[in-house]
Image (spheres, rainbow, N blue to C red):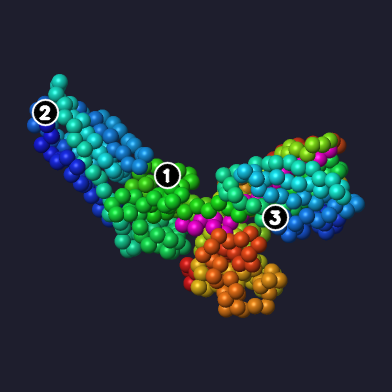
Amino acid sequence: MKFVTPAVDQVFTVTSGAAWPHIPFETDGSGPHTWQWTIEWGGFQKSGTASTAGNTWDAQPAIVNCGGTLTVVATNGGASASVAVKVRGTNPSQAEILAYLATKDGSSGFDRIVWHETKGRHFKGDEPYKSFDNGYGLTQLTTPPPTFEQVWNWKMNIDAGLKLFDDKRKAAKAYLSQNNRAFTEAQLRYETVCRWNGGSYHEWDAASNKWIRTRTILCDKTAQSIGWDMTDPANAGKTEAELHARDGAAYSKPRPKNAPWRYFGACYADSLLA
Amino acid sequence: MRTACWLSALLALSACTESPRHEAAPARANAPPAVTARTSQGRTTLTIHTTPGATSEVTVDRDETVGADSEPNSVRVVAAVSDRALVLVDTYDSKPLGLSMCQAGEESFLRVISIVPPPARETLHMKVTSCRENLELADPGLEWRADASTLYVKWLSGPNGPGIPDARRIAFDAKGDAHLSIERQSR
């Protein structure tokens, strides 16, 4: 027995909209078939068995949301045949990412983070992007470890990242609503994006009875999340230009522990949301 | 009605102020011991300056949210318990995740260090602030009541989930041993 379709190493491509392709298998046998399949990529693996009354089987429902190398062994009576094919991906467009996030509650601000950090890169070439620290896909999931499906399906990857963002949003709400204080949607967005990077964006101003942006942080507008604590005597009284001239060359190196500049979530939020 | 007591004036003066990073202040009579911290092999060694010229060391664990090479940003003494134990908080940069998550975040651990009888040893620890785990203390979040030898820990966003307030009470007995309980009182 042998496979009629597909060809060995034939490539099946997931669309930019994360629609999985049909992958039809057909042998030259007849009667009931059993299809043992395994799909694997980068240490992820999923396998199973399907049965059909005839000699054709579509693998799409079995392997949906997964990619890599799909190996299928067909058995028909005492005969068997094996074939391996490739499942590959396509990066989403910015419009597709934004449209997907627009359907998700509480995602305001996360779209900016995802696009700013990745420029929509879920796949490197046609396989999932993997960072140096094993962060996978659009939202560079590391902890908790992503599933096979979250690694390959950019929508599921965004869903997992959005869960982390939603946790930040809950913490931001708790912060802004303490003592029954009022806040705006814009303040919640800034507070959430700030907390994604670290720290709080707002401080309570008793005089005006309002939340205001933390006054003591001056950001370097040429560097995404770098700024200065202006209560630090090393920075007090200096302008952004003076501080940048002093510290800018050091940004590309590991930050010394006692450096007068540092990363601020407030600067990150200012940079992304302005 | 409870009276809030955000540390004693003595502690506020000598210990609650964040010490300059790794800087040791000499121990003074009637002052809680100064504590310094350094990283060694992914753990933190705390050096407690018990009396002028005398020190005691104890090595404690962080967790996976802190980089193995990350030096403490600060260590501050929250309370001295009958000269038998110290409550302190050590703070580190968060180990960042993808998409710059927690690049500017911090992780803090509250520890009870028994210093009498020697050697110094950690008898209790808990995570009190964390960018990675969405832990945020209320203001005030650590409330030491010297009259009751009790520390109250109050979170705006606690261990039960992001945005969910929570509280713990750590009561010290006459031997300086810590007893942890969930604080259910509305405070």
In the image, residue A43 sits, relative to residue A88, either above or below, namely above
The chain identifier of the residue carrying mark 3 reads B
B102 magenta-colored: yes
Q: Could you tell me which secondary element the residue under label 3 belongs to?
A: strand
**Residue at image coords 47%, 67%:** A272
Label 3, label 2: how far apart the Cα atoms are:
70 Å
The chain identifier of the residue carrying mark 1 reads A
Q: Are marks 1 and 2 on the same chain?
A: yes
Picture coordinates of residue B79, whole percent (x, y): 80, 49
Q: Quadrant of residue B139?
A: bottom right
Q: Which mark is residue A184?
A: none
Q: Which mark is residue A146?
A: 1
Q: Could you tell me which secondary element the residue under label 2 belongs to?
A: loop
Q: Which mark is residue A1?
A: 2
The amino acid type found where label 3 is placed reads Ser
User: Looking at the image, is mark 1 or mark 2 earlier in the sequence?
Assistant: 2
Comparing labels 1 and 2, the label whose residue is closer to the camera: 2
Label 1, label 3: how far apart the Cα atoms are:
33 Å
Residue bounds of the magenta highlight: B99-116
Q: Which mark is residue B74?
A: 3
Q: Is residue A249 left or right of residue A37?
A: right
